Image (spheres, grey):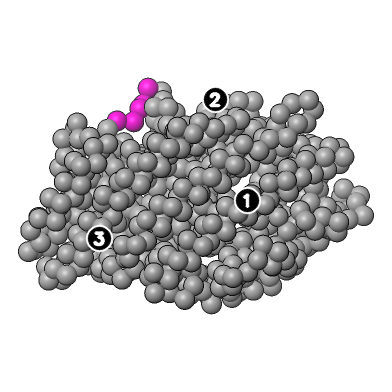
Amino acid sequence: MNKELKLVNKKLLFFPEDFDVKDIDLVKESYNKLLKMPLDTGEDIVRCLEKKSELSMLIGDHLAWLYIDMTCNSNDETKSEAYTTYYNAISSATEKIEFELKKAIYESKARYDLNGPSYTHLNKLLSNEINLFVEENILIRQQITEIENKYGNLYGSLTVNLDGEEKTFAQLNVYLKNNDRKIREQAWRLKMNKLNEHAEKFNEIFDAMKKLRIQEAKNAGFENYRDYMHQYKGRFAYTPDDLKEFHIAVEKAVIPYLKEIDTHRKQTLNLDSLRPWDVSVDLDGRKLNPFENTDELILKSINVLDKVDVEFAEQLLKMQNSQYLDLDNRKGKAPGGYNYPIGRVNSSFIFMNAVGLHDDVTTLLHESGHAMHAKESAHINIDKFKETPSEVAELASMSMELLTMDYWKEFYPNPDDFKKAKREQLEGTLSFLPWCMTVDAFQHWIYTNPNHSVEERNTEFSKLMDRFNTIVDWVGLEKEKANRWILQLHIFEVPFYYIEYAMSQLGALAIYKNYKENPKEAIRNYKEFLKAGYTVPVDKLYEIAGVNFSFTEEYIQELVNFVKKELESC
């Protein structure tokens, strides 16, 4: 593999290399010129869409770097202001014009000249956007974004003192792996006590966003924000009621098996009851140490990807050499992790908070799946065909976690450590599902009961925690249980973007099942799926990947049985 590989800018087709996206007037003028382009033939429409897509890419890349700069330096208010200022200015200047362009294309008779499933799909997407567009909501979304940033800034600023040192919440997770139960409990309580101290402020932030979101839905003619978001996200393949059935299916097919696993955990640890600080510690008393620093994490990840497909490894190497990775945890850095596509280089920027845990390995491989999606779909010149919904995007990333799993000996040369890591991953694919159902059901309740109080909200969340619990004992921790939802970034910053993780997890398990049976065919299908972007509907994309788009109890039980069988070999 060429160690000098780097990302390179692709040639622009419609705009000059020195096009200044910071010049809002120039951007607005460019959008207005798009409105004057002829739309008399199918070729006209495609050319207009491609030119608009290139302009959107240039704007999106600039916004991406502002966002990256902000999250890498969350304690620098000037970074947040720069992002917010540009976001507000560009959306105010272009969102209405972009809608007018989409409407003009939709109303053009020439769009009927565009044949094939991709353009049928495009017509449906455009129609949905046109029907939902409300000019007043542009300002509302800007206001919501400003409040969302307050959540990230507050969360990123929270630290506690432990062992005489200041620790971020992410750094406290290391202590939850400690064999000494008193140390685990101390770290857990420090974190939750700090959260409790700021719970009132977090609730104020959330209620401010909730009020605006409800108004946004009303402006679009919806009774509640839940139904509005379902359509806004283009969830054509299933209904909100289907999701409620999904919740029930997980209760019936997954939780009974997880109770068996947690009962074994309690017995192995010789505990009278399994407490929240007991769920992450290693049962064999050994802590996995996959890497010493992020350079080692990157190198080993490249080697692992190389065993799945050499092109995947080359892409991550290019990102490393081009400084498109920020992986270290540090004070003043926003929480979480993400992959942000950078269209000009057909790649992405990966952001995360590594602290030396096995979770850091899976996070980087997960985000690498997103990065490969961006790379493989780079040939698509119409941006609407690259705006993959979460059910699709997360299938790409979660599948990469599992496809690389059999090669984790790169991180764990000790056979026992390797089996341990694989077992944790397989169990994690199932243990995640109840929490995902909790988060999704909670948001359904929030936005279909919009006039609730903070106390009622906390009570409802506590009920859901009990509903999707296994055997974890929360007695005496009622306040902590009620406030647990505040730690879930998605509820604040990307509402209703979470259930897709569960759908994608099922799909990823099915892809891994196919990989165990026929590796070459499974990878071929996976790459074809990545290349397809969003050119066809969600269920069709799952079909291209070689799996079903399903979350029935019967299908989930089938995958649970597959996981059980795999675990027997660990």
Quadrant showing the N terminus? top left
Gap between marks 2 and 1 measured at Cα = 35 Å
Residues marked 2 and 3 touching at CB (< 8 Å): no
Residue 247 position by quadrant:
bottom right
Q: Between label 2 and label 1, give the one nearer the viewer.
A: 1
- What's the amino acid at mark 3? Phe
Task: Give the residue number, with chain letter if any, for mark 2.
Answer: 295
Q: Residues within 10 Å of mark 3 (few under 14, many from 20)?
A: some
- What's the amino acid at mark 2? Asp
Residue 272 position by quadrant:
bottom right
Q: Residues within 10 Å of mark 2 (few under 14, many from 20)?
A: few
Task: Give the residue number, with chain letter if any, for mark 1.
Answer: 202
Query: In the depicted view, which residue is nearer to us: 419 or 185?
Result: 185
Residues marked 2 and 1 touching at CB (< 8 Å): no
> At which x and y percent is residue 457?
66, 65
**Tag 3 secondary structure:** helix
**Tag 1 secondary structure:** helix
Write the start and end of the magenta stretch as one range. 4-8
Q: Which mark is residue 359?
A: none
Q: Is residue 40 left or right of residue 260?
A: left
Q: Residue furthest top?
A: 4
Q: Residue at x 41, y 58 (%)?
A: 140
Task: Give the residue number, with chain letter if any, for mark 3.
Answer: 99
Q: Residue at x 26, y 49 (%)?
A: 93
| Majority secondary structure of magenta residues | loop
In the image, is residue 63 above or below residue 207? above
Q: Residue at x 81, y 48 (%)?
A: 278
Q: Is residue 543 visible?
A: no
Q: Between label 3 and label 1, give the one nearer the viewer.
A: 1
In the image, is residue 133 above or below residue 324? below
> At which x and y percent is residue 343?
31, 41
